[in-house]
Image (cartoon, rainbow, N blue to C red):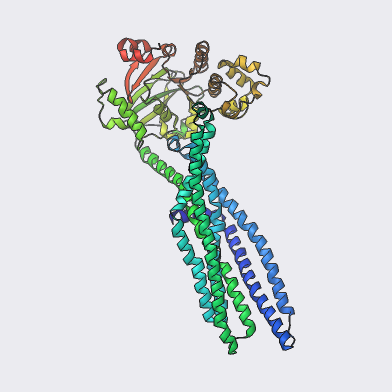
Amino acid sequence: MTNFMRLLKLCRPHYKAMLLGVFLTVLTVLANVGLLAISGWFLASMAAAGIAGVQMNYFTPAGIIRFLAIVRSVSRYGERLVTHNATFLLLSEIRVNVFATLSKLNNKDLAMNRSADLFNRMQNDVDALDKFYLNVLLPMLVALVCVPIVIAIIADFNVAVAMICLCGILLVGVGLPILLSQKLRRTAPQQTQRSAELREALSDMLTGQRELAIYQATDNQLAKCNHIQQNYNELLDKRHKALADSDGLSLIVVQLSMVASVILLVPLVHSGQLLNVHLAMLSLFVLASFETVLTLPNAFIQMPVALSAAGRIFALHDKLDQSQAEALAKNTNQPDGVEFSVAENFTALDLPDQAIGLTLQGVSYQYANDVLAQSQTANLHSTNSSVSNGIVNDSASDRYALKNVSFTIKAQQKVALVGPSGSGKSTLVNLLSGLWPEQEGHIIFNSEKGQNNTQKNQCVARDLSFEKRTKLMGILAQQHHIFDGTIADNLHYAEPNASVEQMQKACEQAQLGHWLHALPNGLNTRLGSAGRRVSQGQSRRLAIAQMLLRHPSILVLDEPTEGLDNQSKQAVMRAIIQAMGRSTVLCITHDPALLTNMDKVIWLENGHVRGEGTHQALLLAHEEYVALTTRF
């Protein structure tokens, strides 16, 4: 019921529209019940008057019937209009809420979910909640209002008939739904899960068509999709069968209740205790009264599915709350002996000509509950069990991607970061960018202002908002996404206010000048979905051009020359270094040509800093470093 109450909280902003929908639905149901009952009484009265040869006033009942018919039609139209609008408002509220949650989650939390699963939560799970108000909440509220009114009216004529009707209503509206809900409680989460799995499998098949064709595995993937589809269809069949059974059982209960009422009323009519025309009216009244609860079985069938989808959505909210609580708890810890400035006063925009340095103090990062990461780290430690630079590889450090990493990069320094695969380079980049939350230690930005650097300012990175950190720091990742649009569109993502001249200059610095001039449409050339119309090298250069437009104070390059030919490699790096002359550069690379041009090299191994110094000094001091950076 927790998810049910949380869904009700999401309904709160639109409660007026929802209550109006409940009122119109109640009006429609009561008008329909009254119309059928009064019509039965009117027809029976007209027949009795005709048999007896007496006159009766048929204008009043005819007018009431006409009035109820008009009320039913108008309220039904209004009910459909209002309830569907309320449903769309609720869906909009939920969808915006889910998107806002996803946008606030850090990349570590997002990385633990497949993109197809996240898309399924945004689309399929949210769409599943369109039935919550219409098919779950609305029937319950209508039944709570209408049933007492109907039973009270019947009891005014005959209490026994009212009790029969109430028992039938409770059986159809409470007993049968509870039975069906218990039957489908286990299948609802499975149905939601199978739906998500099917979309993920289809997404994998569409995105991996080339690999499937190369490995001739298309048939196997199709078989997997068909298997999931069959399981999903079986669960749907169970739900549809349960719905059909409920409709059949409800019809039986309704008919038996009406028959029981007739059997009870006939002796009363025969003895003169009840007017004969009331027999037809009460019989039809009992029959029509079940309209107040006939949709409840379907509501209880739909409720487990809606709550299961809501649970997957609220799981994202819970993950966000947990991440924010952990960040708040860690935010209270400041390094001893160091005072920091207010984060809001520290921004690259306030000091356009400033030099920004970087300091790491005891930074550690652990992949909690990540068996794959732990096993990879353990394998690395098993092959390097010796003591390196006084660092002992204990069993606890096996679970850390980074362990007590400390170093300082001065403003405008060009520093290379090297290390074998799994040494923690990518983890360090994610921490610097703020995409992953910090766990232990501190990342500190140092700014210097004034002609003689007389005014100094420093700030803990976690105190900066993500927006300010992205303006301060630029990341050229190894995997870069090209959006479906023109070259200019992709460049404008990096710098929305960039002019045509600035974009052309950035492309030329990134060694895209000749290619750009050869294109008939120039910057207006469309690149296709995920940049499929450009080569990997061109895509890499375009990412470099985007970064050149931003001019960040600190630039992090992850294998910047990967995918480039030897001729373009040096030209691109010279352009980057020249354009970023006032920036501090941290470059992840193993290219000897790039390492030679760096002011300092930081060598990571097993999540620790193995050594620092120039490239030449490390070559002379460590044979392992020679093997790491020498290309054969």
User: Compared to 376, does 330 lie above or below?
Assistant: below
Residue drawn at x 61%, y 15% is 513
579 displayed left or right of 618: right
User: Compared to 525, does 75 lie above or below?
Assistant: below
Residue drawn at x 30%, y 29% is 378
Q: Nearer the viewer, residue 500 or 101?
A: 101
Horizontal and vertical percent position of residue 298: 53, 60
Q: Nearer the viewer, residue 46 or 422?
A: 46
Where is residue 54, by image quadrant?
Answer: bottom right
Q: Nearer the viewer, residue 477 or 455?
A: 477
Horizontal and vertical percent position of residue 143: 54, 66
User: Among all residues in the image, which is located at the extreme bottom?
Assistant: 271
- Image quarter of the C terminus: top left
Visible in this render: residue 401?
A: no
Horizontal and vertical percent position of residue 476: 49, 24
Visible in this render: residue 281?
A: yes
Residue drawn at x 58%, y 88% is 273
Q: How many numbered circles does the render carry?
A: 0
- Image quarter of the N terminus: bottom left
Horizontal and vertical percent position of residue 540: 53, 21
